[in-house]
Image (cartoon, rainbow, N blue to C red):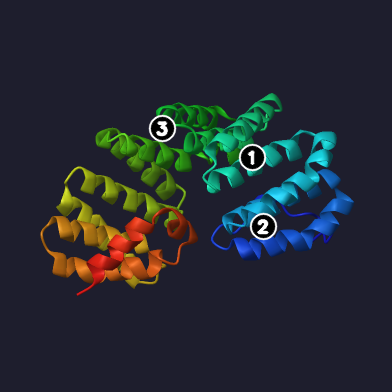
Amino acid sequence: MDENKLPTISELWDFSNPEATEQKFRDLLPKATIQHPAYGLEISTQIARTLGLQRKFDQALELLESIQKEITEIGSLPAIRFHLEKGRVYNSDNKQQLALPEFQKALALATENNEDYLAIDAAHMLGIADAPAKQLDWNLLALKLAENTKNEKAANWKGSLYNNIGWTYQGQNNFPEAAQYFQKAFEYWQSKKNTSRTFIANWCIARNLRSQNQLPQALTILHQLLEEINNGAKPDGYVYEELAECFLLQGDPQQAKPHFKKAHDLLSKDPWLQANEKTRLERLQTLSLD
């Protein structure tokens, strides 16, 4: 193995552990800066992203501002990532009006420089951060880019975009249309033999079925997911929450109660839910009590 070869950014990311990922990027930064200054700047933007995921928003913005002058002087790729990550920090801090122009700059730069993967990333972030009436258009643009790109890595956005579009329709209470995209996501991840993403896609289908009051069908899927957990898959608070909600709708609060407890035990540890879904967590706790 070539000791001087620099790893790709995607090789270093573990989104389930931003703290460890931050350390990997920090360890690499001095070597990357010496060997390839533009790549070193990209690494700095990713450190900012790890800080944002840890909800250290001020630190993330301080880091990005410290490299802004260098970014403007060194080339397009660091600049695209700079605007993307600045937008993500603002978005995670619920400052969408500050995030939107950053994502728009990233999309324009990525499109201009034929960076399809990052263009799709920027469009998909606009689909998250923009007003609900505009989210679908951004997601459909991102999907069009993914379906037409010749870049294999960029094409791999399709599974995530099917999921995002499904949730956009779900948010509009267009449950039949949402179901079609959740099914596409499931089939996509199944074809890639990605068990963790297939698991999530299956949960999305179950959640959609509950919205359509198809509780027996939803419970069939949820019990399959529960069996996967019992056979070694990572415990998932959203699965327990969904089981509990289905049992509650069926008029069986006693059967729902232990699932509400497991859901609360797991989901209450999530920093994003702590910051943004306090009422939801309080409800889980209340419904888990005797």
* Quarter of the view holding residue 255: bottom left
Q: Which residue lies furthest to the bottom in this view?
A: 290
Q: x, y (%) of residue 78?
A: 75, 40
Name the residue that disc number 3 marks. Answer: 132
Q: Residue furthest left?
A: 251
How many angstroms separate mark 3 from mark 2 (CA)? Answer: 33 Å
Badge 1 element: helix
Residue type for callout 3: Pro
Q: In which quarter of the image is the N terminus?
A: bottom right
* Quarter of the view holding residue 165: top left
Q: x, y (%) of residue 264?
A: 34, 67
Q: Quadrant of the C terminus?
A: bottom left
How many angstroms separate mark 3 from mark 1 (CA)? Answer: 20 Å
* Quarter of the view holding residue 249: bottom left
Q: x, y (%) of residue 33?
A: 85, 52
Residue type for callout 1: Leu
**Mark 1 or 2: the one toward you:** 1
Q: Which of marks 3 and 1 is nearer the N terminus?
A: 1
How many angstroms separate mark 1 from mark 2 (CA)? Answer: 18 Å
Badge 2 element: helix
Residue 84 numbered mark, or none: 1
Examine the rendered structure and indicate whether residue 210 appears above or below residue 238: above
Left or right of 101? Residue 47 is right
Q: Which of marks 3 and 2 is nearer the N terminus?
A: 2
Q: Nearer the viewer, residue 81 or 267?
A: 267
Name the residue that disc number 2 marks. Answer: 12
Q: How many C-alpha atoms fall within 10 Å of the one at disc 1: few (<14), some, or many (≥20)?
A: many
Residue 202 numbered mark, or none: none
Q: How many C-alpha atoms fall within 10 Å of the one at disc 3: few (<14), some, or many (≥20)?
A: few
Q: How many C-alpha atoms fall within 10 Å of the one at disc 2: few (<14), some, or many (≥20)?
A: some
Residue type for callout 2: Leu
**Mark 3 or 1: the one toward you:** 3
